Amino acid sequence: TSLRVRVVAPPTAPLARISQHQVDCDGFMYAGQPRKVELVFQDDQLDLVWILFPAQEKHAFLEAFTARYGKPSLEVDFGSIYLAANAAVRNAPTEVLFASERQARAMMATLQASPPSSPPPSP
């Protein structure tokens, strides 16, 4: 229903060296509902897709992601991370995240460099 392009200057995203743009959309259909979506481009490459949803839907998204991708690879303060899909369900704000391969590698390097905040899921 709406679309807005924002130029973030200077770039603040970790992979952006030259440019960062964010496209904000309202009314993007996802999981049967119109949602707000944020598309983050770093140096003209789409690296992050954030799809916002109300907190009361979090459990349903976790169930759907687990049914599709298996148990979360990691559960940290940020949320539940599904490495097989370069995806996550974020705790706060409640959002679904899809990341490019290069973004996922950068995020994992950051997670591995920081001490664990919660125990890893049991096998």
Image (spheres, rainbow, N blue to C red):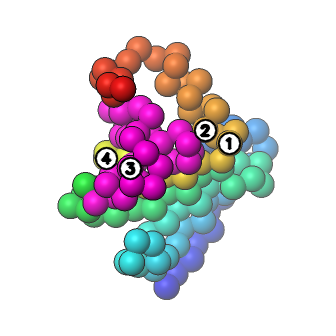
Q: Amino acid at mark 1?
A: Glu
Q: Given contact means CB atoms under 8 Å apart, are the residues at marks 1 and 3 in contact? A: no
Q: How many marks?
A: 4
Q: Which segment did they paint magenta?
A: 60-89
Residue 104, numbered circle:
2
Residue annotated with mark 3: 66
Is label 4 in a helix, a strand or a loop? loop
Residue annotated with mark 1: 101
Mark 1 / mark 3, whichever is N-terminal: 3
Task: Give the left or right position of residue 69, taking residue 63 as reference.
Answer: right
Is label 2 in a helix, a strand or a loop? helix
Q: Amino acid at mark 3?
A: Thr
Is label 1 in a helix, a strand or a loop? helix
Task: Give the left or right position of residue 42, taking residue 78 as reference.
Answer: right
The answer to whether one can see residue 8 in this image is no
Q: Amino acid at mark 4?
A: Ala
Relative image position of residue 61 (x, y in whole percent):
34, 58
Q: Given contact means CB atoms under 8 Å apart, are the residues at marks 2 and 1 in contact? A: yes
